[in-house]
Structures are given as C-alpha cells and as structure tokens.
Amino acid sequence: MAEPLTINYGKAAVSVYRADEACNLFAAEVELVAHGDVFLSSYTEGDNSQVVATDSMKNFIHSCALEFEGTSLEEFLALVGRSFLDRYEHVERVTLEGRERTFERRGGVLYQQLHGDRGVASLDVGRDGIRDHRSGRERLHLVKLRGDAFRGFVRDEYTTLPDADDRPLFIHLDVRWRHADFDKRVPGEAVRDALAATFDDFVSESIQHLVHEMGVRLLERFEDIEQVEFDAQNRLWDTALTGDGVKVYTDARPPFGVIHLTLGR
C-alpha cells in the first residue's frame, strides 16, 4: 500500500515591488511553502477544508509587503513566515525562499534593473520561531586573467587536457551561509566583496583550492557566520588566437565542471 512520506504545498515566483512616498523601492521574488499533517486528507481524500489556496498565499505575501518597512530580504521573509503562522493556526511550519530583484537608483524617481549577482535567502519558520535559515548571493560571475593553475591531476587513457601553469579563470559562483544568530547577520554585499578580494589576490592550483581559501578567509573575517557553502562552475574561456603578447578568447562550450564545498567552524 502506498504511504505518503512527505507532503507540502505552496506558491512560487510571487513578485513583490514595494514603493513608498519617498520613492524607495524594495523588490523580491518569494516562494512560500506550508507544511503539516493536517493537509494529508487533501491528498488522500480530496478534502480541501484545511487548504489555504495558493492564490491566497500570494495575496498574503503582498499584504505583508504593504506593512513591511525594512530593506532586508531576510527580515521580509521572517515577517511573512511569522505572520502566516499567526493567521493560520493549523499550519505546523512554513519554509520560504526569496531572491532579490536588483535595482539601482539612478535619480530621484528613476531606477535601473540590474541582472548581475543578487541576494538570496531561505527560512524555516515554526511555532517555536526560526528553525533554520540561509543567506546567500547567487549569479556571481567572476573572471581572473592570471593567477590560477591546474596541473598534476590524474593522467590515463582518457586524459587529453594539458597542464596549465597560469591561466585565466572564469567561474559562475553561488554561495550561501548560515549565521550563528539570525539577528546578527552579515550584509550580503560584504560577503561578496570579501570573496572577490580573495579571488583577486590568491594564487590557486584549482577551483577547489580557490573556493576553500574563500571559505577559510570568510569564516576568519566574519565571526557571525558559522557555515558557508559554495557551488561553482568552471566557465574557463577557450583560446581562439595568440600573438605578440596578446590572447583572444571565446566562450567555453558545455559541458562545464562543477565544484561543491561546505565549510563549518
């Protein structure tokens, strides 16, 4: 007999743009997921008497944005999670994912949307408060023109890649971290800048070597961060032409190498 092992449901890709009278803008995309055994009968019996419609979830998120006065993505997710549990007492807990929609102010009333790196966050909110959380940055696309090598790896009948003593390195990087105390958070921009500084001055022997150093330095610099997690892709450019001290590169073609690392204290 089939037995449900995990159940949850929610609303994803809820866009939020909050503008006040001073033309300050808070913009994000939010996912809200509800958890609880009370929803089991909606799966097994078609009984929707305890189901909060996902359209109502979308409207609830917008209502929270109306009262939100902060600027932090994490604070907004916490407001949504706590308020949702207060309103719907039969829900056991909620999980939330948020991504910034990044705009830069260009004038008194003008903003430009940017498509570079952005802040992300995830929260697990229960009746006892915030059970777990992650902050992060994603879509960090960083290129270093020298100061990375890749050599000494396994060579066998499948190996065609030559050793590289010094190469440009282009990576796509997502990073997430957990704070020891949710209320003592490090700004995402400070983490991003610290990672970029490490990439700039550290001479690495591989991407693995690089992200490890990034993590070590991050934990040394920010005592409020207790764990950091990296997901990177190697987008190393292909060499097209060389001559007279100049090299011309072109975009790498898939497949791409992937690297993961989690460091904790």
Image (tube, rainbow, N blue to C red):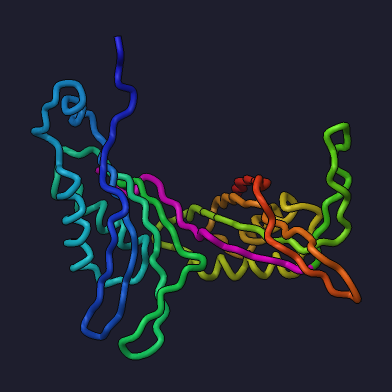
Place of residue 86 in the rendered image (x, y in percent of width and height, measured from the top left) = 16, 49
Q: Is 153 displayed left or right of 261 in the figure?
A: right
Furthest-bottom residue in this view: 108
- Measuring 23% from the left and 38% from the top, which residue is drawn there? 92
Place of residue 51 in the rendered image (x, y in percent of width and height, measured from the top left) = 14, 37
Place of residue 97 in the rendered image (x, y in percent of width and height, measured from the top left) = 36, 51
Q: Which residues are magenta?
A: 126-145
Vertical relation: 9 (above or below) 225: above
Front-most of 74 and 257? Answer: 257
Q: Is 49 displayed left or right of 117 in the figure?
A: left
Q: Quadrant of residue 95?
A: top left
Place of residue 96 in the rendered image (x, y in percent of width and height, measured from the top left) = 33, 49
Front-most of 220 and 153? Answer: 153
Vertical relation: 265 (above or below) 214: above
Is 256 in the magenta? no
- Measuring 37% from the left and 60% from the top, which residue is drawn there? 74
Q: How many marks?
A: 0
